[in-house]
Image (tube, rainbow, N blue to C red):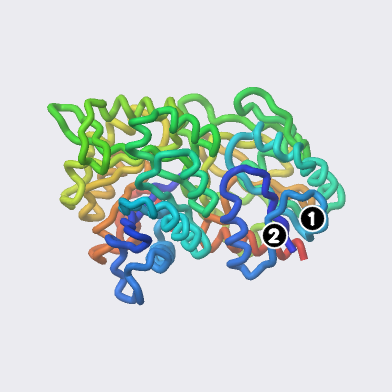
Amino acid sequence: MIAVIRYGVGNVKSVLCALRHLGREAILSSDPDEVESASGVILPGVGAFATAMQNLERDGLDSALCRINSADRPILGICLGLQLFFSESEEHGSYRGLGLLSGRVRRFPPGAKAPHMGWNQVRRQKPSALFDGIPDDSFFYFAHSYYAQPDDTESIIGVTDYEGSFASAVARESLFGVQFHPEKSGPWGLRMLANFCHLCE
Amino acid sequence: MLAKRIIPCLDVKNGRVVKGASFVSLRDAGDPVESAARYSEAGADELVFLDITATVEARATICDLVARVADEISIPFTVGGGIGATNHISDLLEAGADKVSINTAAVKNRQLITRSAQTFGCQCIVVAIDAKRADGSWLVSIESGRTPTDIDAIEWAHQVEGLGAGEILLTSIDADGHKTGYDLELTAKVSEAVRIPVIASGGAGTPQDIYNVLTAGKADAALAASIFHYGKFSIAEVKRYLAERSVQVRS
């Protein structure tokens, strides 16, 4: 059973739809106990970093996520979910994140077209089970104005060219994060979600 | 590299597609879910549903449609038509829409753009601008193009960016329905005036029209209806045409 965390930000239903499409059992939950008892967790989300973090803290989901990560159980962060893994964000000020990975969330430089919206390619940096069976340079769907800059470049498994290049997929042990939306990225996106589900078994 | 997007638009009335796909193999050409699934399979990068129902029951019907489409397809889609309040936006997003498109309500109540961008994130707030030529400039029309205003379309595009819109869906009323090409001048002017993505709409008749609006028109995406609906060109044909001319598309 995969738990998709519901914490009052954006369209999380699509993730659930995609998992059901794959024939996977999944629940939407904002209950830390329920989330901790799942075999794997997906942290989706679009919207503002500070509000998202506040909501996670309000529901006790921040500490649940840290415990799940320490227990080395699989977590997949999608879009804002990935950004929340990092120590801090500069979105509308300076805000502390979950700190599961060290690094900052930054805005695309002034003058850049933002949001970075649409289909872009992900260039593999190192092998990862998340990309099993997915060709290198495949297109995924992005919709974001901020991106993560990990301190540890070893955690970067995929990069995407936009205003230079940024880390579009990261992994450390059982923690995975993608800046794009696999649930909205057609067959390759569904394949990636299936890969993640496989890691949760 | 970020690909240019090809976006079919489906007009929906009372939960049924009224101007939509004409895939020969469709069992029910009026079923939005089936049309959406076919477009998704055919390589569409996104879809836009424009609700042209003019009744009070429209809202529940469109939310039900959105939920059924979200269950079926795994590409992004936008819903527009008659959206006037944040709770309506929230209903549509909760039902599974990725973005909403606001037009008349944005003009009448600019705060709606800001408030909804703050609440839901700017990436899901598309402001639709219907522009009509008038003595060397373009003026915004509202209420499905029926009501002219004295708002300069390029200035309005710039303003909606500042108010928090994440994307602009720009329709040339003069070009719409004529299949003789997009208004390249208007599209280029709006694209140059903002730093958010611009979807061009109105006038696509051939792959070359789409090529022109994505290059000379500087648009990030091209929306088209009849060119695809009546099977004149397939999405694959358009994408091949673009790729052969070095326009990056998703293969």
> In this orientation, which residue lies closer to the viewer: B126 or A144?
B126
Is residue B170 at all visible to an observer of this figure?
Answer: yes
Check the residue under mark 1 and report the chain it is in.
A
Check the residue under mark 2 and report the chain it is in.
A
Answer yes or no: are tags 2 and 1 on the same subunit. yes
User: Percent from the top left, x then y, of residue B152?
Assistant: 25, 26
Task: Please identify the quarter of the rendering in which residue B193 is found.
Answer: top left
Give the total number of marks visible in the rendering: 2
Q: Amino acid at mark 1?
A: Glu
User: Percent from the top left, x then y, of residue A53?
Assistant: 70, 36
Q: Residues within 10 Å of mark 1 (few under 14, many from 20)?
A: some
Q: Is residue A148 above or below residue B35?
A: above
User: Percent from the top left, x then y, of residue B17?
Assistant: 33, 62
User: Percent from the top left, x then y, of residue A108?
Assistant: 54, 31
- At mark 1, the secondary structure is helix
Residue at image point 40% right, 28% down: B110
> In this orientation, which residue lies closer to the viewer: B27 or A73?
B27
Residue A34 is tagged as 1
Q: Is residue B100 above or below residue B243?
A: above
Position of the C terminus of chain A by quadrant: bottom right
Q: Amino acid at mark 2?
A: Ile
Q: Residues within 10 Å of mark 2 (few under 14, many from 20)?
A: some
Position of the N terminus of chain A by quadrant: bottom right
Q: Tell me how far mark 2 sits from mark 1, CA to CA.
A: 9 Å
Image check: B53 left or right of A141? left
Is residue B243 at all visible to an observer of this figure?
Answer: no
Q: Residue furthest left?
A: B135
- At mark 2, the secondary structure is strand
Q: Is residue B9 above or below residue B191?
A: below
Residue A27 is tagged as 2
Task: Please identify the quarter of the rendering in which residue A25 is found.
Answer: bottom right
